[in-house]
Image: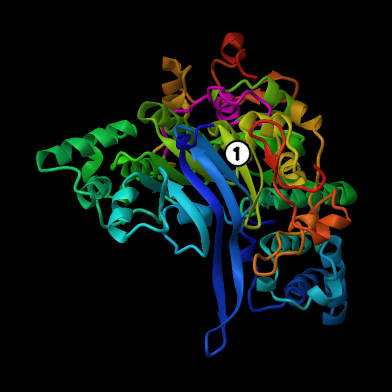
Amino acid sequence: MAKDDNLVEIDNLYMHFPVLAGVMRKRVGDVKAVDGVSFNIKRGETLGLVGESGCGKTTTGRCILQLYKITSGKILFEGKDLTKIGQGELRSTRKNMQLIFQDPYASLDPRMSAGSLIGEPMLVHKLVKGKEYKEQVAELLRLVQLEPFMADRYPHEFSGGQRQRIGIARALATRPELIICDEPVSALDVSIQTQVITLLIRLREEMNLTYLFIAHDLSVVRHISDRVAVMYLGKIVEITDSDELYDNPLHPYTQALLSAVPIPNPVVDRQRKRILLTGDVPSPVNPPPGCNFHPRCHMAIDICKEQVPEGKEVGSGHWVACHRV
Amino acid sequence: MIFQEPTTSLNPVLSVRLQLSETLELHRGMDRETGFEEAAKLIKLVGIPDAERRAEDYPYQFSGGMQQRIMMAMALSCNPDLIIADEPTTSVDVTVQAQLLELIDSLRSQFGTAVILITHNLGIVARYVDRVNVMYAGRLVESGPTDVIYNEPRHPYTMGLIGSVPRLDLPRKRQLYVIDGLPPHLAHLPTGCAFHPRCRYAISRCSEETPELEPVGDNHTSACFRREEQEIFARAT
């Protein structure tokens, strides 16, 4: 694959948050939120990022946007290393990458009208002048299936699904290339989830967007993504094509995760093999040695307790980090 | 009763043993000592390792999944005939969700308790439930055995719900069935069938009269005027 096909390349990303304790605020350990993650996102594709809570999915997304100062690693956006460029350049690059938040109730300023929420990014980046502003806001509202007259309303006047649409319109305001969708539908009702997912898919086609779609719901992620990366405790354990993920999951964690999602049809669901994981996700402060999944893994052998498995390519575009594969 | 959010349902300043014992003392007339013993047994029953020691811990020392297990122990403490589990797994991860639901299911068969499982997750319903009641805006719209509801739904709302969720086993590019609009405000319900403004198959009668649950098969009822029109429901998977 040609290198310039990649919109985002992440190489060996580490994001450790210090744990401070005592009166001297001494550093007593690290939360290894992201622990050596590498992947790339091709232009125009949707990469899904799944995993349980606390596995580092959101942190990864935020690192791409440079919302944290990363511990080490490289983040290339259109070939530029974001960790090396200056503030001014970073600001203009950010225009091309936007974020859709998980909670539409917490992420919109209650004192700003829908119109100014949506228009603000355009003003910040000086993208519009005078009369154009109003037209653009109206256009964005229509794009997310809201009505232009709603621009004067405030967030509390909207339902959860409508607020999420405002969040989407706001993210689209700067005409970005990349949108990081951080659990965009998990706070919504089932029927509203489908409306928003369908909208996101339509927008992607119309505006040639690239998505990093972060979610814990495997069926939603698979539906919207071209490729899926599965994360466990700060590391990526498997990356593969969305169809392959369900037909041929290789990592035991992916298999367990898939089997934990019941299929909404009793007849089909009864025929599936079930793997029940025991225990909880360990703390990222003290991850287990070796493969960090081994204490919960049904396939673990001795080597898993000692050595961190290297990632390997098995078949085209299917990458997995497990000793047993 | 098992609640949705174990974190807010447990008392943070009492050890779990004391909280469990409180119920036992009040309802089963135990004294503190036997209450404590019974509490540890219950904690063990819901699959918490090292129960004797963990019983002394406070809720914050348990993970979300473990807290929900404590809630289950509490619900089981008086040998109930019925357990109402209100979205018991909404606040936990899928792998823990699977653990908890397996536990509820095994306790159900072990003690012969009936369970009402309240959930919005259609997958959970498919896997663990014998009979389903589908509710919309305060009324039951369809009721029947799980297999029948999923394979031959006879209410447009049920059909829409089932068609609207992405499924792991179906082709990825499948067009999802979108139910347009929003659930109505319960203080301002639409006239007639509450679902008619969002229904693709609504006829004029739907906005005038309220349909009642009527039988459409063995143990299967639907509150839809067009429930007998096979062609509407034929496309449901």
Please give the range of residues in magenta: B157-184
Q: Which residue is mark 1?
A: A228
User: Furthest residue to the front?
Assistant: A2
**Vertical placement of residue A185 versus B222, above or below:** below
- Magenta span contains residue A68: no
Specify whether A292 is left or right of A199.
right
Nearer to me, B37 or B89: B89
**Vertical placement of residue B134 versus A95, above or below:** above
Instruction: Give the residue at x 72% y 23%.
Output: B148
- Magenta span contains residue B181: yes
**Vertical placement of residue B63 versus B172, above or below:** below
Q: Residues within 10 Å of mark 1 (few under 14, many from 20)?
A: many
The quarter of the rendered structure image containing the C terminus of chain B is top right
Nearer to me, A141 or A158: A141
- Where is residue B100? Give x, y as percent: 75, 52
Specify whether A281 is left or right of B142.
right
**Vertical placement of residue A234 versus B146, above or below:** below
Instruction: Give the residue at x 58% y 56%.
Output: A56
